[in-house]
Amino acid sequence: MPGADMLGLDQVSKLLKLGCALLVVAMLAATWPRDELHTRPPKPPSQQTGPEPRAPSSSAVSVGSEAELVRLVAQTNGPREIELRAGTYRGDLTITRALSLRGDGGAVLEGSGHGTVVSIESDDVMLENLAIRHSGRRQTTEDAGIRAKGARVRISNVAVDDALFGITLGPCPSCVVEHCRIRGLTGDPELRGDGIKLWESSDSVVRGNLVEGARDVVVWYSRRVLLDGNTVRHGRYGTHFMYAHDSIVKNSLIEQNTVGIFVMYSSRLQVEHNVLAGAHGAAGMGIGFKESDGVVLTGNWLVANTTGLYLDRTPLSSSKPVVFSENVVALNDVAMGFLGAEAGLTFERNDFHENLALVNFDAEGQPLEARFAHNRWSEYAGYDLNHDGVGDVPFQVKQLSRELVDEMPVLSLFEGTAAFGLIDAVARAVPVLSSHVLLSDPTPAMSSLSLGRHN
């Protein structure tokens, strides 16, 4: 064969193997069935947020001027409840005593543009039914629409616009942010502040909010936080947990962010019935975990992301298992990315549907130790002769591209490309070409799972 002396017979054989794989891909690409997904996504959360018209309260002192507002808020023994009539109240405001400050739906607190618009420095403060705008722009002082330090602070039906940071809590134990609307600044996303930030704010609740165009939603150094029914879009991190043990995020729509949810150094998180979609770009992922334990992820939709699910040394210990059940992972470039062998991981009753690649695995030669059972795979070509709903032969993912790179390291230049995606598809269509099994589900489900929204 021409060139055999130069390449060597072994290398020629490897090239023929590669050529054979490409030929099989070309022949089969037009004949693979396009399965339909029959499961139901979670119901989108309500987006009825921000101020709304309300009847005046009979127990509150009504205020209609800036001077009167400042005077009453500053009084140590001032009224416990203040209601703002419709209008614009200019100047930054600091609250240092227990107080309920409400608007009638048309009241606007407009800051000076130098610092935070509303600073809360007391326990038992309620801020409700107001629009807040025009903070400063200093990252070093985290100028915000609202900054709260105190216990049992409640911020409800507030709209924050034209502010570097939206709502910042910390320390703020047992605080609530609900039905608020936060829109980030225009311009460079990296120069924006966080939409909602919790720092040392354990036992707090963030519920029914809409965050658009901010940098992140952050939960740091805070335990037992509940995030429920929020919509976060067009930001960097839809939600970023760090040292946020025993927290819950559920019933939320997190879309078109660089990363949907990312969890770092956190244990016993519950991630339930969320839609995590449209995280594109090289770093795009629906949800990712780094060195976290005891996570339960169930009933979520991870759809059309660069990577649907990413796991970096999660769980840290196999004695603190991580369980993924009844999720839909569909139309992602890569369904699952693993950095580490992942002992202690279980995937049960998930629906993997039409992902370009199922697995990206890097564990320095270690086998993937995650357990798969009763998952539904759109790529599965097996059969069910006894009609029990379970495939009679295991579903296996083989990575021919990894074998080729091991044998010919120069081919590593093509890792992550569409060409290698097609090569790995060959391992599914013609298993004899590859012996390197990345994952195996011994009991694959034969039909779509009945997944829906649960409360």
Image (cartoon, rainbow, N blue to C red):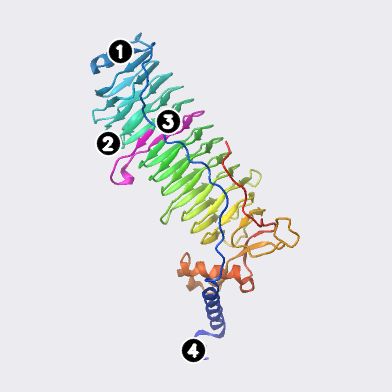
Q: Residue at x 39, y 28 (%)?
A: 157
Who's the residue at 51% across and 36% down the image?
Answer: 244
Q: Reading the chain from its start, which is encountered first: label 3 or label 1?
A: 1
Q: Nearer the viewer, mark 3 or mark 1?
A: 3
Give the alpha-carbon distance from disc 4 to disc 2, as whole Å.
66 Å
Identify the amino acid type marked 4: Gly
Give neighbour class at mark 4: few <14, some 14-19, many 20+ (Cα, 10 Å). Answer: few
The image position of residue 410, as x and y in percent, is 48, 73
Q: Is residue 25 above or below residue 369?
A: below
Which residue is more in the foreground, 73 or 8? Answer: 73
Identify the residue under disc 3.
179
Region in magenta? 181-209
Q: CA distance from mark 3 to mark 1?
A: 27 Å
Question: Circle 1: is it few (<14), some (14-19), or many (20+) Cα within 10 Å?
Answer: some
Mark 1 falls on what kind of element?
helix
Quadrant in the picture for residue 358 = bottom right
Q: Which residue is mark 2?
A: 137
Residue indicated by mark 4: 3
Q: Secondary structure at mark 4?
A: loop
Residue bearing mark 1: 72
Given the image, on which type of amino acid does mark 1 rest? Leu
Which mark is in front, 2 or 3? Answer: 3
Res. 105 in view: yes
